[in-house]
Amino acid sequence: MNIVVCVKQIPDPAEPGSLDPGTKTLKRATKLILDESDSYGVEMALQLADAAGGGEVTLVSMAPNNEVSGLRTALAMGAAKAILISDPALAGSDALGTAKVLAAAIKRVEGADLILTATESSDGYTGTVPEQLAELLDLPSVTFAKHIEVSDGVVKVQRQTEAGYDDVECPLPAVVSVTAGVVEPRYPSFKGIMAAKSKPVDQLTIADLGIDPSQVGWAGAGQEIVSVEQAPARESGEIFEDDGTGAEKIVAFLENLKVI
């Protein structure tokens, strides 16, 4: 079973860096790491390939400066190979531009049975790329998967909802986005880390994918960041001394908030 996993390489949340005052976007010139959200998809892909009796897991990522640090982590977990799209023209790409690039790269993977993604990235939180990707690939899609099984050309998913989960089935190939906690990602072993150094990473530009520069980056973005403001400091709460009327004060406070 051949599985493609879309992974994003992001600035380390412990040292996220700063915003570019000109573009109002996060500077990404430093070392990038594998988004924790995507580690669940990588682990799920590896487990599904093992359950199928064999196969290959291919990573697809879009990152600046030919950055591969995060990819090497996923390769060390057990993925076989990776495709990295890195091009200055991609700077400023919105979610749809990103989906166009990922879709074009995935089409280069022969015999892909399943495409896995996270529900959203930790540094973007748009949550729209998986569905855009499915549309561009003309494939069925299932979102918020908390459990996945594959058999007889069908993917069976427990799709998480507010009330529990729905049982969903669709034919392969398909695009499935997984939730955090769907599996427990493995830690790369020393052997895996050493092996990852020699695993192939195919580095491409948008020209290699046949993508017009006007469709991606700042030129193709359908959104614009017009301003960035510091989050307001959290105000201290109001303290009530219970003098026997504490319950009445709480009720009045909740009524004022229109909670009751």
Image: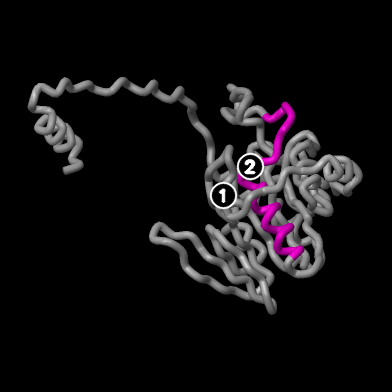
User: In this orientation, which residue lies closer to the viewer: 255 or 47?
Assistant: 47
On the image, which quarter does residue 232 sit in? top left
Disc number placed over residue 235 in the picture, else none:
none
On the image, which quarter does residue 115 sit in? bottom right
On the image, which quarter does residue 220 sit in? top right
Can you see residue 203?
Answer: yes
Looking at numbered disc 1 in the image, what kind of residue is underneath it?
A: Ala
Disc number placed over residue 36 in the picture, else none:
2
Label 2 neighbour load within 10 Å: few <14, some 14-19, many 20+: some
User: In this orientation, which residue lies closer to the viewer: 72 or 204?
Assistant: 72
**Residue for point 70% across, 57% down:** 103
Dot 2 and dot 1 residues touching (CB under 8 Å): yes
Residue reaching furthest to the bottom: 152
Q: Is residue 126 above or below residue 160?
A: above
Question: x, y (%) of residue 237?
Answer: 27, 23
Question: x, y (%) of residue 54?
Answer: 81, 66
**Residue for point 81% across, 65% down:** 55
Looking at numbered disc 2 in the image, what kind of residue is underneath it?
A: Glu
Q: Magenta part of the protein: which range? A: 28-50
| Residue at the spot of label 1 | 180
Q: Main secondary structure of the magenta part?
A: helix
- Distance, label 2 to label 1, CA atoms, is 8 Å
- Location of the N terminus (image quadrant): bottom right
Label 1 neighbour load within 10 Å: few <14, some 14-19, many 20+: many
User: In this orientation, which residue lies closer to the viewer: 155 or 231?
Assistant: 155
Can you see residue 71?
Answer: no
**Residue for point 74% across, 57% down:** 46
Question: x, y (%) of residue 7?
Answer: 69, 48
- Location of the C terminus (image quadrant): top left
